[in-house]
Amino acid sequence: MSAAMDTESTYSGYSHYSGHSKKAHRQGRDRHKSPRSKDGSRSEKSVTIQTPPAEPLLGNDSSRAEEGQDDNWGETTTAITGTSEHSISQEDIARISKDLEDSVGLDCKRYLGLTVAAVLGLLVFLTPIAFILLPQILWRDDLEPCGTVCEGLFISVAFKLLILLIGTWALFFRQPKADLPRVFVFRALLLVLIFLFVFSYWLFYGVRILDSKDTNYQGIVQYAVSLVDALLFIHYLAIVLLELRQLQPMFTVKVVRSTDGESRYYSLGHLSIQRAALVVLENYYRDFTVYNPALLTASKSRAAKHMAGLKVYNVDGPGNNASGQSRAMIAAAARRRDSSHNELYYEEADHERRVKKRRARLVVAVEEAFTHIKRLQTEEQQKAPGEMMDPREAAQAIFPSMARALQKYLRTTRQQQYHSMESILQHLSFCITNNMTPKAFLERYLNPGPTLQYDRDRWFSKQWTLVSEEAVTSGLQDGVVFVLKCLDFSLVVNVKKIPFIKLSEEFIDPKSHKFVLRLQSETSV
Amino acid sequence: SYLISFSFQQRIEIHKLRQGDNLILGFSIGGGIDQDPTQNPFSEDKTDKGIYVTRVTQGGPAEVAGLQIGDKIMQVNGWDMTMVTHDQARKRLTKRNEEVVRLLVTRQSLQKAVQQSMMS
């Protein structure tokens, strides 16, 4: 990158900008990121449950923003210097300790669950083999010889065990993609069922066969076969309970982001609230446009102006009539003739015009830049050997001509933080390699895309908390509302039941498709 | 007082007016057994497929003879007009060798009936 900088000067301004952009903002981000730096290696997101808190949730947006500006802050707290780079505020200490607890607790729980399941699985798998082998080992001489039927049963046991193994591997041996706060009820039930089942079989075996040293080997083998059959049926039950039951859509779920009102609808089946939250979050990263705090400044400044417009003084002394105060404020605000709606309208119209202009300039610049690049065919390679470049060099060659237009457009749409120069160059060389048109190259920059498209550092949303009034293992019902909170915003989820549809049929005889021409003419005589 | 609706028949004699090469009567007809009776604004019964007078030109022979808009034409010169197509009706009214047409029309009328008892 530095070599390119030396040859061209038009985009040095851009690199300057990316180096100094929002230093304070980034520091704020880094502080909160510190204990979670190992998130980069972990690919799953953790969801922790939190009962509705009595004190404000950690990482409250307004308190962070006003850290240096709050008037009362200096009076009530004594030892905290929140604006210095190297100190940690009280909030951070509390958050670090909470994170440590959470991470240790969750990991333990998850690995414990996995170990139990694995041990149980191994036990269950080895049980039929043990049933068949133990008599051979312990009282081989007394056993009746194994006839044809009995040996046939060996084959069937072997294959059924193989099928069971493959089925279990397919169903259960998957990388866990998320960490849920409570135990997965159906899985726990199934484990208990399997355990009881195998335990009762062992009990029977121990009492009736081991103790009495039964000599009917065929009966023993058939007993083992019946165990494997029953295990296959339990596996079927597991498929139905864990996989099939939630496939049929029963509920429509509306997800609204609290900061800008972007909403989506999803269809879900019978799921518990925590699993529904998981589905919603997985779809969030794909469907919702990335959260951009820079877009909210306009509405925040308007809100601040509203608040600053009126001050209420209580001249009657103590006896604070808070509701009366607020009502008086609202009434006065309604009566006041403020032209903020006018400002908003003109501001928005102006902004749209500016964006459209910059977009037009950008599209033209990119199209012109792309015309300079031509893919070399193999015949032409001999003709102009000196000019051959690989995609990266080609991208660096045409980037300066469009850099300024692109930078201006990104600034106008407030997306400049999401695209660094390196990422733009990479994308450009990717598009050149794959023979994409200028419009395909621009698709990523013209409109904000889903969160997955951007760098992980810019996500603003990695740790989620599920806030719900009902228990999170209870199933979805009509009218359930739960909230998925992360540090900067929250997703409010509203569940509605899909209505019962009554469909009736009406038969139309194909011979009834006959028509007459009905006129209404008027003739003068 | 209240309104009574009834229909009465009337005989109307129209003398055709010569306009250039044509003999005109000065009104327009609508309806016919091949037409849509539900669109007739003048009929009381919307299944009535008879011929109705839809327009009467000012000062024309029909107006002079007393034909009114909304009249149903029952006969023309003795020919029945209650079960004819629109085109047949037109032909019967515009015969080139006839100078006078005698129509039998039905007209609906609303009259206010004044209760005699109240007056006395």
Image: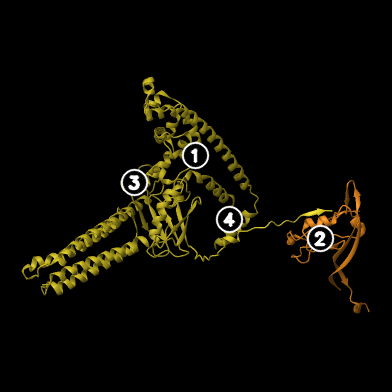
Question: Helix, strand, or loop for circle 3?
Answer: helix
Tell me whether circle 2 and circle 1 mark residues in contact (CB < 8 Å). no
Closer to the observer: label 3 or label 1?
1
Q: Residues within 10 Å of mark 4 (few under 14, many from 20)?
A: few
Q: Quadrant of residue A317?
A: bottom right
- The residue labelled by disc 2 is B52
Among the chains pictured, the one given yellow colouring is A
Q: Amino acid at mark 3?
A: Ser
Q: Amino acid at mark 4?
A: Tyr
Mark 2–mark 1 Cα distance, whole angstroms, equals 67 Å
**Badge 4: chain ID:** A
On the image, the x and y values in percent for residue A45 come to: 35, 51
On the image, the x and y values in percent for residue A474 come to: 39, 65
**Badge 1: chain ID:** A
Closer to the observer: label 1 or label 4?
1
Is A463 on the left-hand or right-hand side of A169? right
Residue shown at the point (73%, 62%) measured from the top left: B38
Which is more toward the observer, A279 or A239? A239
Which is more toward the observer, A415 or A448? A448
Compare marks 1 and 4 and give the one earlier in the sequence: 4
